[in-house]
Amino acid sequence: MPIDATLPYDSGNIFARILRGEIPAKTVYEDEHALAFHDIAPQAPAHILVIPKGAYVSWDDFSARASDTEIAGFVRAVGHVARAAGMVKPGYRLLANTGPAGGQEVPHLHVHIFAGRLLGPMLAQRGEP
Ligand code: 5GP
């Protein structure tokens, strides 16, 4: 169910629970600003989620409220994860769904990293789901 990205942060969301270690995740990288783990329902041969450690609902919330240090740390973490996974030469795709029209389902900012095959058109064609 897509979420309203303008709502206040809900600390009970699934990614907040992963950050607190309450539920498991297949972690691939962690530093003071970010955590990266495999998506539970991968949509490409490689599908990694990178989340900031701070409490931000969405890309909109993060870009408006996060400090320059948090933003730099998060962006560098995304790049590091892709490089470490060998995705740079074959190529990869980043995606940050935001709000209902973007199809965001988890109300904690996450950047998807997709790789491992030709990823096709950037958006589903008209008439496709
Ligand atoms: P969104 O649609 O919000 O951009 O993407 C949410 C993503 O989180 C989906 O790709 C979904 O498969 C993933 N996801 C949802 N719950 C869990 C979970 O408990 N663990 C992991 N690793 N991924 C999850």
Image (spheres, helix red, strand yellow):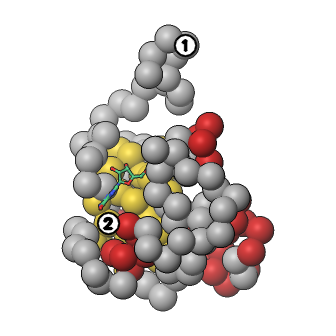
The answer for how far apart the CA atoms under marks 1 and 2 are is 31 Å
Above or below, 103 against 4 in this view is above
Residue 104 position within the rendered picture, expressed as x and y whole percent measured from the top left: 52, 48
Residue 107 position within the rendered picture, expressed as x and y whole percent measured from the top left: 52, 61
Query: Residue 118 appears in which quarter of the rendering?
Result: top left
Above or below, 60 against 32 in this view is above
Residue 115 position within the rendered picture, expressed as x and y whole percent measured from the top left: 35, 44
Residue shown at 43%/84% (left/top)? 31
Viewed as shown, does residue 69 lie left or right of 112?
right
- Seen from the viewer's position, the closer of residues 106 and 89 is 106
Mark 2 vs ligand 1: CB under 8 Å?
yes
Q: Which label's residue is closer to the chain start, 1 or 2?
A: 2
Above or below, 129 against 69 in this view is above
The answer to whether one can see residue 78 in this image is: no
Above or below, 1 against 84 in this view is above
* Disc 1 element: loop
- Residue under pointer 1: 126
Q: Residue furthest bottom?
A: 32
Residue shown at 55%/13% (left/top)? 126
- Residue under pointer 2: 37
Residue shown at 40%/60% (left/top)? 49
